Amino acid sequence: MAKQFRIWALLVCALVSIAILIGPAAAQVSKADGKEWGDECIRTSGGPSRSLSENQRCCQEQAEKKNKACKDDPSNVVCVNTVKICKEMVKCDDTLNKCKIKAMETDKDCSKDTCKQCTADYKSCHDSALN
């Protein structure tokens, strides 16, 4: 009985330690907000005519508009890391647009592998931004 109690006590201690270690890391970023802000900036970007820096500035504007803590303290680690996700998403979209424009100079219907690779690269970039 004492041996089982010690095992359970060790298990509980281990789980609490893991929760303490993971807790702060999880609070360092909001992936959902970063994705939402990135999607909004991409949606309202006006396409490839808007510069990457303008689109990335949109991420900071979204943070300030949609999160009071970010408006009060833009250097807050959660805000910085969440804005980073947004900026990475916007960068992926910008790269996709440039890639497709170049590929479609010779492949108007985007049916060749070069053009299809643009989309594959975008998906990989987008997934990486969210992870």
Image: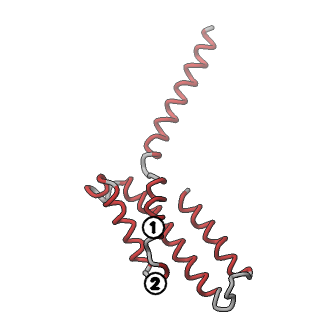
Residue 21 picture location, percent across and down:
48, 39
Q: Is residue 122 toward the left or the right of residue 21 in the image? A: right
Q: Mark 2: which amino acid?
A: Ser
Residue 2 picture location, percent across and down:
60, 9
Q: Residue at x 47, y 61 (%)?
A: 85
**Which is more N-terminal, label 2 or label 1?**
2
Q: Nearer the viewer, residue 24 or 119?
A: 119
Residue denoted by label 1:
87
Q: Quadrant of residue 55?
A: bottom left
Residue 34 picture location, percent across and down:
45, 58
Residue denoted by label 2:
49
Q: Residue at x 43, y 81 (%)?
A: 50
Seen as rendered, the residue at the extreme right is 112
Placement of 13 over or under 99, stated as above or below: above
Residue at disc 1, secondary structure: helix
Placement of 68 over or under 115, stated as above or below: above
Placement of 27 over or under 88, stated as above or below: above
Q: Quadrant of the C terminus?
A: bottom right
Q: Is residue 20 toward the left or the right of residue 79 in the image? A: right
Q: Residue at x 63, y 8 (%)?
A: 1
Q: Mark 1: which amino acid?
A: Lys
Q: Is residue 52 toward the left or the right of residue 109 in the image? A: left
Q: Nearer the viewer, residue 53 or 5?
A: 53
Residue 90 picture location, percent across and down:
48, 70
